[in-house]
Amino acid sequence: FEDSLKLWADMPGVREKDLNVVLKDRVLTIVGQVATDMYAGVRPMYTEYNVGNYYREFALNEDIDESKIRATLRNGVLELELPKKEKAKPRQIEVRSA
């Protein structure tokens, strides 16, 4: 995790079209809607999770390169990769006489 941070969110029942990931003012917001019509008429005997919508916010610090954030939804798990900015490298500055 030297170059990036990874965040995983379990979001069973959320489809890609019903998922929004928004970055505004250094706040990353995740909103997922579960289409309840998928569960109409279903009466499970046991479930590992409750069916519902999702909402989370994360404040990002200045070390994250906002332009390179990537999100992938696979099998109900959202993976966010938050790359860190490259640190300024030392360089020689030419001095000229006036």
Image (cartoon, rainbow, N blue to C red):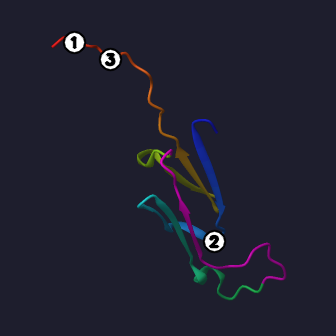
Find disc 3 in the rendering and name its residue.
93
Q: Amino acid at mark 1?
A: Arg
- Comparing marks 2 and 3, which lies closer to the viewer? 3
Answer with mark 2 or mark 1, whichever residue precedes in sequence: 2
User: Depth-wise, is mark 3 or mark 1 nearer the camera?
Assistant: 1
The quadrant in which residue 50 appears is bottom right
Say above or below: 89 vs 6.
Answer: above
Question: Could you tell me which residue is drawn at 62 percent across and 36 percent down?
Answer: 2
The location of residue 91, given as percent across then percent down, is: 39, 19
Determine whether 47 is above or below 25 in the image: below
What x and y, as percent, mark residue 92?
A: 37, 15
Q: Quadrant of the N terminus?
A: top right
Name the residue type under label 2.
Answer: Gly
* Residue annotated with mark 2: 13
Name the secondary structure under disc 3: loop
For the residues labelled 2 and 3, the Cα–Cα distance comes to 56 Å
Residue 91 versus residue 5 in the image, above or below? above
Q: Residue furthest left?
A: 98
Within 10 angstroms of label 2, few (less than 14), some, or many (20 or more) residues? many
Q: Which residues are magenta?
A: 44-63
- Whether residue 7 is visible to the viewer of this picture, yes or no, is yes
Left or right? Give the position of 31 relative to 96: right
User: Please, what secondary structure does the residue beneath circle 1 have?
Assistant: loop
Gap between marks 3 and 1, in whole Å?
Answer: 10 Å
Cα distance in 3D space between marks 2 and 1: 64 Å
Per the rendering, the mark at residue 96 is 1
Where in the figure is residue 35, as x and y percent of width and height? 57, 78
Residue at x 48% of width, y 62% of height: 27
Q: Residues within 10 Å of mark 3 (few under 14, many from 20)?
A: few
Task: Say if residue 75 shows up in the picture.
Answer: no
User: Which secondary structure lies at badge 2?
Assistant: loop
User: Disc number at residue 43?
Assistant: none
